[in-house]
């Protein structure tokens, strides 16, 4: 599996750094702060490291398991739609496309973990519309919605879709008794939310960290406000990202959305349960596009949020085409009946493989020992070259410093601290947020042995004045790695 040999990326490396400190007994938002993220992903990483060991491969092994579980959840949603074959097709597409390097499916990004609770919310709601009503279902909808929220505050799209569908169901059958049932169900959902969120807020409150925890929402607002792209790129970027990964998949999915919308009134009239569940999937798909493009940043992994609902739309659409052929051309041989849907499935899979052609080719060459691992990572993966640079910098720092030394990484390569196993001299890894959490000069209070200076992603390409002055006063330039410069403290030379 290629993912097990790739160097860790900056987002995953930052998450892993915080997880390591959590395991060492330092709560998040205390001595270390993740800036604009809620705690879900960091405690998930910490749990994985605690169970399987502090290594990137522990994350990848867990993700393989979670993505397959997510595929089973998608099959169950397909069953609720009375379309098992469509659910199976959808699960195949989901697992395959979520693993694509074009969407950073070979990393350990938040979206890969969060898609599971997001999908479970829809599956639980489908039970409610298939005569399996239970207060526990509504409580669990709240629980998994809250878990999704703890990964990122905007991950409420499946919850919103279910909430709108419950409201639609209530309005269609408006009666006084239904109104009380509707309120009761909402109460149980919010009880589920409370069961998750109240302990989280209380934990940080009793740790004395609630104000720093709540800073997440302020910094999150900053994160989504820095884009210069107009509002309509909220829709353009996610669709563009999916199209570059698998255009055929996107086209069939959009056809499924349009067709479902056209026939929605008739479906709702003839089969209310099926119609409402279709409504959930359509709204889930639409809202997932908005959530993926909410910040108007072109980060490919954001598009992973769209894959679960779009997979269902594509899988069900292909299965329905197959059923129509069977109904209208019942005299055809089994081979002729299934040749069209099978061809479509193969075309979608083929488009996936074609889009990943360079990646697959490079991995085959690496396994055949035609090229080295470094050549594969550098030349055939999306951000491989820059991740190798981070790995080299981390190795150099580790070889030329002591375990108790701190370092300052004023760059987007946030994985350096994790790879070097050195503490950051400042509580936040991302350069943009250093000044937002206190005086920036605090970064030099522990006299970091190394300062890594380089491009700061899309945020800030210029060296800050406070950093420049400290470099002039206390640091010597030592070595360059690609575009990244290492400066060493005068007082920390071996």
Image (cartoon, rainbow, N blue to C red):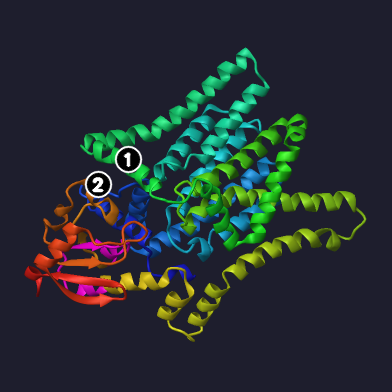
Specify the segment rendered in magenta.
Answer: 395-419
Whether label 2 touches label 1, CB < 8 Å: yes
Residue 432, given in percent of the width and then of the height, sits at 29, 53
Q: Nearer the viewer, residue 150 or 234?
A: 234
Classify mark 1: residues with Cα within 10 Å, few (<14), some (14-19) or many (20+): few
Residue found 37% across the figure and 69% down from its top: 387
For this orientation, the residue located farthest to the bottom is 370
Give the image quarter of residue 268. top right
Determine which residue is flagged by label 2.
436
The answer to if 370 sits in the magenta stretch is: no
Q: Which mark is residue 268?
A: none
Determine which residue is flagged by label 1.
218
Q: Is residue 169 above or below residue 121?
A: above
Residue 185, given in percent of the width and then of the height, sits at 53, 24
Q: Quadrant of the C terminus?
A: bottom left
Residue 346 seen anywhere in this rendered image of the structure: yes
Tell me the CA gap for discs 2 and 1. 10 Å
Residue 486, given in percent of the width and then of the height, sits at 21, 71
């Amino acid at each position: 599996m290629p993912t097990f040999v790739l160097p860790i990326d900056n987002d995953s490396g930052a998450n892993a750094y915080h997880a390591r400190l959590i395991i060492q007994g330092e709560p998040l938002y205390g001595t270390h702060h993740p800036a604009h993220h809620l705690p879900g992903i960091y405690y998930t990483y910490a749990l994985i490291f605690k169970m399987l060991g502090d290594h990137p491969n522990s994350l990848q092994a867990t993700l393989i398991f979670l993505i397959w579980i997510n595929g089973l959840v998608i099959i169950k949603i397909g069953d609720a739609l009375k379309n098992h074959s469509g659910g199976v097709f959808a699960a195949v597409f989901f697992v395959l496309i979520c693993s694509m390097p074009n969407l950073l499916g070979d990393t350990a990004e938040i979206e890969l973990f969060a898609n599971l609770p997001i999908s479970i919310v829809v599956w639980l709601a489908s039970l409610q519309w298939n005569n399996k009503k239970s207060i526990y279902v509504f409580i669990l909808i709240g629980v998994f919605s809250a878990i999704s929220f703890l990964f990122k505050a905007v991950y409420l799209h499946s919850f919103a879709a279910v909430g709108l569908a419950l409201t639609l169901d209530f309005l269609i059958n408006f009666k006084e008794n239904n109104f009380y049932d509707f309120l009761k169900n909402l109460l149980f959902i919010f009880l589920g939310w409370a069961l998750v969120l109240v302990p989280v807020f209380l934990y940080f409150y009793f740790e004395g960290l609630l104000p720093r925890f709540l800073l997440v929402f302020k910094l999150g607002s900053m994160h989504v406000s820095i884009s210069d792209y107009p509002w309509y790129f909220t829709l353009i970027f996610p669709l563009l990202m999916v199209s570059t990964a698998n255009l055929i998949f996107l086209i069939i999915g959009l056809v499924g959305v349009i067709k479902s919308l056209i026939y929605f009134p008739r479906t709702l009239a003839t089969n209310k349960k099926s119609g409402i569940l279709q409504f959930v999937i359509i709204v889930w798909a639409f809202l997932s596009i908005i959530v993926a493009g909410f910040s108007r940043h072109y980060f490919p992994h954001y598009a992973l949020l769209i894959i679960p609902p779009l997979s269902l739309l594509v899988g069900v659409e292909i299965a329905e085409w197959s059923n129509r052929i069977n109904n209208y051309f019942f005299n055809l041989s089994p081979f002729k009946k299934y040749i069209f849907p099978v061809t479509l499935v193969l075309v979608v899979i083929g488009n996936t493989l074609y889009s990943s052609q360079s990646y697959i080719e490079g991995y085959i060459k690496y396994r055949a020992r035609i090229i080295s691992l470094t050549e594969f990572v550098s030349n055939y993966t999306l951000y491989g070259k820059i991740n190798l640079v981070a790995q080299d910098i981390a190795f150099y720092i580790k070889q030329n410093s002591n375990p108790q030394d701190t370092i300052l990484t004023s760059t987007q390569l946030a994985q350096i601290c994790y790879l070097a196993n050195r503490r950051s001299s400042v509580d936040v890894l991302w350069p943009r947020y250093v000044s937002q959490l206190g005086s920036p000069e605090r970064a030099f209070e522990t006299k970091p042995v190394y300062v890594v200076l380089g491009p700061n992603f899309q945020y800030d390409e210029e060296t800050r004045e406070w950093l420049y002055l400290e470099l002039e006063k206390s640091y010597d330039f030592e070595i360059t790695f690609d575009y990244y410069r290492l400066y060493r403290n005068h007082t920390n030379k071996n």
